[in-house]
Image: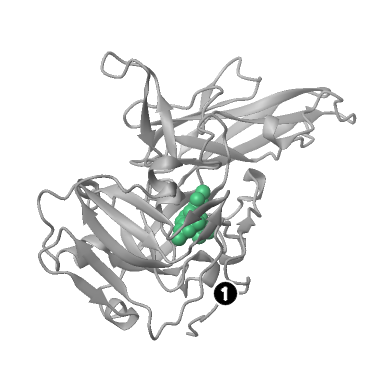
Amino acid sequence: MKRPLSSKSPPGAPMRHFPLRPHHLLERVTPVKDLFILSPLGAPEIDLETWRLTIDGMVERPLTLTFDDILRMPKRVVEAFHQCAGNPRQWNKPTRRITNLVWGGVALADVLARVNIDPKARFLWSYGMDHGLYQDTAIDNYIKDLLVHEISACGALLVYEVNGEFLPPENGFPLRLVVPGYYATNSVKWLCRLHFAEERSKGYFTTVLYNDPTPPTADEPNGGIRPVWEIATESVIVSPAQKARVAPGMVDVWGWAWARDGVESVKVSTDSGGTWQSADLEPQRGQSWQKFHLAWTCDREDGQTVLMSCATDRYGNSQPATGARNAIYSVPVFFGDRVPDSFPQNENEI
Ligand SMILES: Nc1nc2c(c(=O)[nH]1)N[C@H]1C(S)=C(S)[C@@H](COP(=O)(O)O)O[C@H]1N2
Ligand SMILES: [Mo]
């Protein structure tokens, strides 16, 4: 297998690529050519000969690893959904930027077993090698943090392969963090350093951006913040596609649902949210998304309706109608020959 050495995009040029809408998500495992790419600081230039992963901070035995050291460790393969949280300041807008991938790498917990973490360390800061200007702010490294006690629970991986190939340069070659069940912003690409600390990182992408407001409480009368970590339970309908024409007869309404610890049930509405029916749902494999189906007997010959899906996880969390990253996805469809004038023009309205 060839190891890519440098990126196709010029170093430092911002990258934004979201090739798939929900109705394009026909494959269980998203092909590598269709991966989304989001890197406002662009891909850094990396020389594999000098690249190292350093583990330091509140550890007894700091460690430096080469790429070959990592390749020699026991390999783990995990199928997991990978979702972008969207604009870091917009907690109330759905993005539907979702894929499902097979990651290959080493368990982060296996690597950390070698350094003896100080029990007082609460956070792991992960450093990406990309740097530069982001909205007029100078960034030395893209940094994210994680709670130390979550590392094993969420099955975090140090990843060098996606769908059996080395990571493309744009997606973090040679090594990236992958935190299954967490928004992809936490899965730091071009990883170079893991640092243990008692407090959260002050990095721009850690504690300035990517923190959602929380409602006021007795302890926090002005409201608080919650880091954009765990993915909120969500689902999308793949077929029928948005604004499709639906013919009378049996229609297979299907899509994907995902939740950090698995989706328990999915309900589908074929009458714009008026009534809801339970869809058939497959069990979760690893941290994968789950397929759902509803056989809908359509007897309409004109007019329109909106199809919707709503997932509920094993803790009873389900999707809100509006105003959230995981708000219910709506698919307007029509019957007969005339495309309705009232169809939303802007995809973001859906
Ligand atoms: N080093 C680094 N890691 C990063 C980012 C980045 O800009 N720099 N972007 C994050 C965001 S917001 C997303 S959605 C995912 C995108 O991963 P992908 O480009 O491999 O799909 O990478 C995350 N990891
Ligand atoms: Mo993202």
Q: Is residue 12 above or below residue 252?
A: below
Q: Secondary structure at mark 1?
A: loop
Q: Residue furthest right?
A: 338
Q: Is residue 44 above or below residue 204?
A: below
- Using the image as rendered, state which of residue 291 and residue 145 is in the foreground: 145
Residue 153: give x, y in percent of width and height. Answer: 23, 48
Q: Amino acid at mark 1?
A: Ser
Image-based side of 281 in relation to 244, left or right: left
The C terminus is located in which quarter?
A: top right
Name the residue at 34% across, 68% down: 105
Q: Is residue 69 left or right of residue 12?
A: left
Answer with the quarter of the image where residue 11 lies.
Answer: bottom right
Q: Position of residue 253 (x, y in %)?
A: 62, 36
- When the figure is inspected, residue 20 is found, relative to residue 277, above or below; the finding is below
Identify which residue, 81 or 84, lies in the foreground: 84
Crowd band around label 1 with a 10 angstrom C-alpha radius: few (<14), some (14–19), many (20+):
some
Q: What residue is shown with label 1?
A: 7
Left or right: 27, with 335 as reference point: left
